[in-house]
Amino acid sequence: MNHTPQGFTNIDSDFSKVKIAEEEKSENRKKTKMESGREVWPRDPKKAKQAIKQAEFKCEIDDTHETFVSEASRKNYMEAHHLIPLRMQHDFENSLDVIGNIVSICPNCHRLIHYGRDKDKKKVLELLFE
């Protein structure tokens, strides 16, 4: 059985077929859709997988962070995070759901970015934007 926390998409399956893009073309932004009564921007799970694979299943905040071995990928479990949040998509002509805007981070760092103290978030985000 595959459990995915509410609000997260399960992208942790079959990385063997995922190709790493050599160069990414800009894309027009996609149209929003309504989910649970709110407007959301669509995400492409393949791009999230590509970003994680490109980072070699390592946390891009600290590549020594280890989690657990994923049953699906047989690699260190990582999560995808958009550097520029998709909620900002209205301010951009091109799609923010591109590999260049997606980082591979461990679950602990991912939770820190979303739920941590502002001063701790700032340190981590500065590392990602260097």
Image (spheres, rainbow, N blue to C red):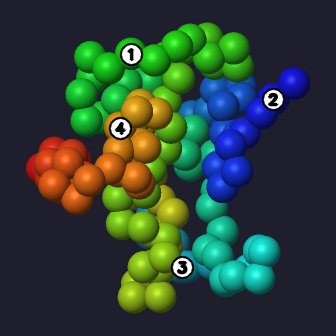
Alpha carbons under labels 1 and 3: distance apart: 36 Å
Residue at the spot of label 3: 28
Residue at the spot of label 1: 66
Residue 119 appears left or right of 113:
left
Residue at the spot of label 2: 2
Give the percent coordinates (x, y) of residue 48: 55, 46
Alpha carbons under labels 4 and 3: distance apart: 30 Å
Query: Which badge, 2 or 4, comes first in the chain's sequence?
Result: 2
Query: Which badge, 4 or 1, comes first in the chain's sequence?
Result: 1
Q: Residue at x 43, y 43 (%)?
A: 111
Alpha carbons under labels 4 and 1: distance apart: 11 Å
> Mark 1, mark 3: which one is toward the viewer?
1
Q: How many marks?
A: 4
Q: Is residue 36 above or below residue 60?
A: below
Q: Is residue 78 above or below residue 75?
A: below
Give the percent coordinates (x, y) of residue 75: 54, 14
